[in-house]
Image (cartoon, rainbow, N blue to C red):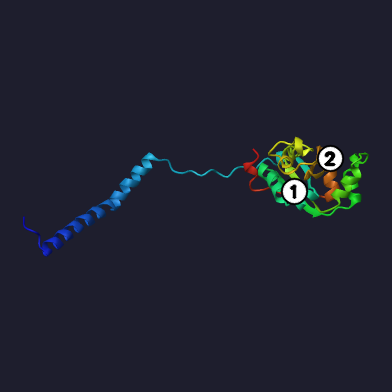
Amino acid sequence: MRRLTRAELVLALLLALSCMWQLLAHSTSPSRILTSDHHLNSTTQPISYPQALPKANISKMAAEQTYIMIKPDGVQRGLVGEIIKRFENRGYKIAALKMVHASEEHLEKHYKDLKGKSFFPGLIKYMASGPVVCIVFEGKDAVKTGRTILGATNPLASAPGTIRGDFAIDVGRNVCHGSDSVESAKAEIALWFGEQTPTINYTRAVDSWIYE
């Protein structure tokens, strides 16, 4: 068999490249692209984006406010962010927030229902030992659900997944206080934030994704 000369090899290579170029040009021609797009459109549905949701029902959202106080142990242990996160992740919004170092006199007003208890003096002294974080959370059934998020007063009786069930052991270091009724919440909010418009009324962008 005769071996191809160098010139013949170069010519064969050029012919092969020419054929490849023609095939490539044909596959990317406008008519070819149009045919491909038409096929795609005929077998798939166009992407549709949801219309803006209507505004959430404010009367449902603002039906309740609850008072949550992060106690000195919660502050010292760096749990403030985690506790706020638990409530916000559930869907509740902050209506008021501040940090204070309360006096014993102020704390005695807050815990007046416990004044006859033997542990009352120690409770007041402990609560006055460091700053607390005062928060008003707002939303549907805020008081009842807030208590559920906190867990039982005795941390050892609190279920895992609750704040006290995850972060506390002793009753005297149970991280948080939470209002136990709507009436108590109103009184506690007034005590800690004042009588005149203690909270801020606003609507979040995410409210329509939380409430119907």
How busy is the neighbourhood of tag 2: few (under 14 within 10 Å), some, or many (20 plus)? some
How busy is the neighbourhood of tag 1: few (under 14 within 10 Å), some, or many (20 plus)? some
Helix or strand or loop: what does disc 1 sit on?
strand
Residue at x 32% of width, y 48% of height: 34
Q: 153 or 53: which is nearer to us?
A: 153
Residue 190 location (% of width, % of height): 85, 47
**Quadrant showing the N terminus:** bottom left
Mark 1 or mark 2, which is nearer to you? Answer: 2
Q: Earlier in the sequence, mark 1 or mark 2?
A: 1
Q: 60 or 160: which is nearer to us?
A: 160
Q: Are the residues flagged by discs 1 and 2 in contact, CB closer than 8 Å?
A: no
Q: How far apart are marks 1 and 2 (CA)?
A: 17 Å
Q: 180 or 65: which is nearer to us?
A: 180
Q: What residue type is labelled 1?
A: Ala
List the residue tagged with mark 2.
184
Q: Which residue lies furthest to the left in this view?
A: 1
Residue 131 location (% of width, % of height): 81, 54
Residue 200 location (% of width, % of height): 76, 50
Residue 76 in sight:
yes
Q: What residue type is labelled 2?
A: Ser
List the residue tagged with mark 1.
95
Residue 203 location (% of width, % of height): 69, 47
Helix or strand or loop: what does disc 2 sit on?
helix
**Quadrant showing the C terminus:** top right
Q: Is residue 192 left or right of residue 159?
A: right
Residue at x 74% of width, y 41% of height: 164
Residue 195 in sight:
no
Q: Which residue lies furthest to the bottom in this view?
A: 7
